[in-house]
């Protein structure tokens, strides 16, 4: 009986949380074919300016086509989302071409609610409200060709092998942690933290990394 009461309370809290989320067409994706595995966005972002970020400094000139990854901590709703973009840069440090990737429950708001209670089917395409809003914090790292290939291979394996989201273990922070480790970055073990906090921690752990690998 106590267990049923706890479940009822959790469900009510999640429903109230869902009501505060932005409305989106993502909610209508249940039962529909998944979006393409890789979605390239034609938008421009400012150079990274996270609190501890030095990779690269805002306005730093890099060679055109320099490969990079940028980790995002988004807080458009509670508890937020952690994602990454990866691709190539212009000489002024703005993204030339990139792909947005995030591990989240399928089905938009409905999936967010259920994925906070039970394991739920997931995807890696990202919600529209996260893609269109600037992140609360971000951390950019320039990549060698070898590191870029490792990251790309990791993301392809994730898309193929990991089909479940659960807020407490199989969440978006875990995805970013494992992606960072795939390219040799130091990444905190715990993943049950707010996304902006984790991205700042990731930046702090790797503050000695050389900005331009050449």
Image (spheres, rainbow, N blue to C red):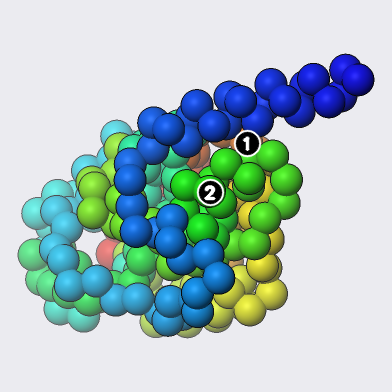
* 145 in relation to 3, above or below: below
Q: Is residue 21 left or right of residue 112?
A: left
Give how far apart the Cα atoms at labels 2 and 1 are: 21 Å
Quarter of the C terminus within the rendering: bottom left
Is residue 2 among what the camera can see? yes
**Mark 2 or 1, closer to the camera:** 2
Counting from the top left corner in percent of width and height, residue 99 is at 34, 72
Q: Residue at the spot x=86%, y=24% of the render? A: 3
Query: Please, is residue 102 above or below residue 78 in the view?
Result: below
Q: Residue at x 43, y 56 (%)?
A: 27
> For the point 15% across and 78% down, which residue is it?
64
The dot on residue 110 is 2
- Is residue 213 something one can see in this rendering? no
Q: Which mark is residue 114?
A: none
Q: Is residue 108 above or below residue 91?
A: above
Q: Which residue is mark 1?
A: 192
């Amino acid at each position: 009986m106590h267990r049923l009461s706890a479940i009822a309370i959790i469900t009510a809290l999640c429903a109230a949380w869902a009501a505060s989320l932005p409305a989106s067409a993502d909610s209508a994706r249940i039962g529909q074919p998944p979006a393409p595995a890789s979605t390239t966005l034609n938008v421009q972002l400012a150079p990274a300016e996270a609190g501890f970020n030095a990779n690269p400094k805002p306005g730093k000139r890099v060679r055109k086509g320099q490969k990079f990854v940028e980790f995002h901590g988004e807080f458009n709703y509670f508890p937020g989302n952690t994602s990454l973009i990866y691709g190539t840069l212009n000489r002024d440090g703005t993204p030339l071409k990139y792909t947005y990737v995030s591990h989240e429950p399928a089905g938009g708001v409905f999936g967010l609610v259920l994925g906070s209670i039970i394991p739920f089917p997931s995807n890696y395409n990202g919600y529209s409200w996260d893609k269109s809003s600037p992140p609360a914090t971000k951390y950019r790292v320039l990549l060698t060709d070898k590191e870029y290939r490792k990251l790309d291979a990791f993301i392809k394996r994730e898309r193929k092998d990991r089909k479940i989201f659960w807020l407490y273990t199989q969440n978006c922070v875990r995805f970013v942690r494992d992606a960072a480790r795939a390219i040799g970055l130091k990444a905190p073990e715990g993943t049950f933290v707010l996304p902006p906090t984790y991205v700042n921690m990731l930046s702090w752990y790797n503050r000695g990394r050389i900005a331009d690998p050449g």
